[in-house]
Each structure stands twice: as C-alpha cells, then as structure tokens.
C-alpha cells in the first residue's frame, strides 16, 4: 500500500490577522516543518498552499484554483497532484503541530478494513488530521464546481471512518495567537 501525505496550508487565518500559518514558528521550527515531519513514513508529500517555500524534505507544492477554496478543494487538489500514486492518503492541517508520525501510524492502523480514520479531540470533535482510502475518496468525490466551499463533513459523510481519540495535545490546533502562546507555554 502506497501512503502519501497532504498538508493543507492555504487557509485565510482570519483570526490571526491573515498571517501565513505555515511560516509561524513553534519550538524553533515552522508549522509547515512540523506538519511535514508527521509524514516521515509517507512516500510523497504534497503541500496545498498559495506559494512554495524551501523545505528540509522535498515536497510538491500545488494550489487549488481558485485559491483558498477550503479543505475539500485543498484535499482534492492534493490528491490530483499525486496522480493516482497513493492508495492511502493522509490529510493534515498545517496548524496542528502536535500531530506526529506516531499519530499518522495510529490513524493508518485504525483505518485498516475501513474507508479511513480521523483524529478526534477529547470532546469527540473530528479534527483535520486523518487518512483516507484514495479509491473510496474517488467514489464520493464531488464535481469541480461543488468542491470550493464544501464542508469536509459533507464529503466524508458516506465513508466508513474510524475515530481515533487524541492522545495528549495531538488535537490542538493554532487558530488564534492565544492558541500559539498556550502551546509555547
């Protein structure tokens, strides 16, 4: 089974004054570097973002058209960039720096025999960290005109997904400057 990863880094960061979250630093590294590290076991990594930057690991940068179309448009743009090379696709929001390679391994294990698995916080809320069977994702894929602005839960609704409960701070995301400060503290 070929495992490839997609990092979604094209959001608007409205609650952070429009900053490029991928370039925000935590523990001396960018959020993008943390996200790419979560895919240490992946054969290939695609970053969906408006622009390319230097990364320690070779990755492919792509951008949905038009940009900032939301997580569904970003996910499907990333899948298209993989040119059907992946049988299992990881998806991770760039603002989840506590998701690690171990997290991705747990998600892949939980997805065995199912359409995928997603990380859930302690309250049971699905996070933007998961793995999906690429073929099953193709079965539920909407038309191009319906992808932009589509809610992720709507895309995933017909799929049989395992729920993986967050361990520690895995499910913490950086939506505000306060979130970042709390992670640093």
Image: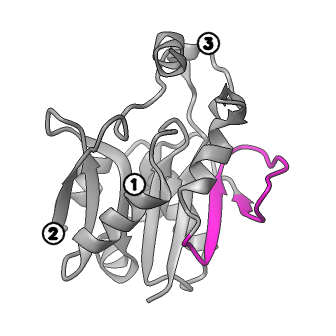
Question: Can I make out residue 64 in this image?
Answer: no
Q: Secondary structure at mark 2?
A: loop
Picture coordinates of residue 150, whole percent (x, y): 36, 46
Residue linked to disc 1: 146
Which residue is the site of mark 3?
17
Residue 160, which numbered label? 2
Q: On screen, 168 above or below 147?
A: above
Crowd band around label 1 with a 10 angstrom C-alpha radius: few (<14), some (14–19), many (20+):
few
Q: Give the quarter of the image for residue 68.
A: top right
Contact flag, marks 2 and 1 (Cβ < 8 Å): no
Task: Compute the Cα span from label 2 to label 1.
Answer: 22 Å
Q: Residue furthest bottom?
A: 1
Q: Residues within 10 Å of mark 2 (few under 14, many from 20)?
A: some
Q: Main secondary structure of the magenta part?
A: loop
Q: Earlier in the sequence, mark 2 or mark 1?
A: 1
In the foreground, 140 or 5: 5
Q: CA distance from mark 2 to mark 3?
A: 37 Å
In this rendering, the answer to whether 14 lies above or below 58 is above
Work out which quarter of the rendered image holds the N terminus and state it.
Answer: bottom left
Q: Nearer the viewer, residue 6 or 40?
A: 40
Q: Is residue 12 left or right of residue 160?
A: right
- Tell me the SS state at disc 1: helix
* Label 3 Cα neighbours within 10 Å, binned few <14 / some 14-19 / many ≥20: few
Earlier residue among tags 2 and 3: 3
Residue beneath the point at 57% across and 15% down: 16
| Nearest the eye: 135 or 34 | 34
Q: Are marks 2 and 3 in contact (CB under 8 Å)?
A: no
Asked if marks 1 and 3 touch (Cβ < 8 Å), the reply is: no
Q: How many marks?
A: 3
Q: Secondary structure at mark 3?
A: loop
Q: What residue is drawn where x is 46% and y is 40%?
A: 98
* The residue stretch that appears in magenta: 41-61
């Amino acid at each position: 089974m070929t495992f490839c990863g997609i990092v979604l880094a094209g959001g608007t960061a409205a609650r952070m004054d429009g900053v490029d979250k991928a370039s925000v630093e935590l523990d001396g590294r960018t959020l993008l570097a943390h996200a790419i590290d979560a895919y240490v076991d992946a054969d290939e990594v695609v970053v969906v973002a408006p622009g390319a930057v230097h990364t320690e690991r070779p990755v492919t940068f792509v951008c949905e058209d038009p940009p900032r179309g939301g997580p569904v448009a970003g996910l499907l743009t990333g899948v298209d960039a993989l040119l059907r090379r992946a049988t299992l696709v990881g998806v991770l929001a760039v603002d989840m720096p506590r998701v690690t390679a171990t997290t991705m391994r747990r998600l892949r294990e939980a997805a065995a025999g199912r359409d995928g698995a997603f990380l859930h916080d302690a309250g049971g809320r699905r996070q933007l960290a998961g793995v999906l069977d690429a073929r099953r994702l193709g079965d539920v894929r909407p038309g191009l005109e319906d992808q932009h602005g589509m809610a992720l839960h709507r895309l995933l609704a017909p799929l049989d997904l395992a729920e993986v409960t967050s361990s520690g701070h895995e499910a913490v995301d950086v939506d505000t400057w306060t979130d970042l400060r709390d992670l640093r503290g």
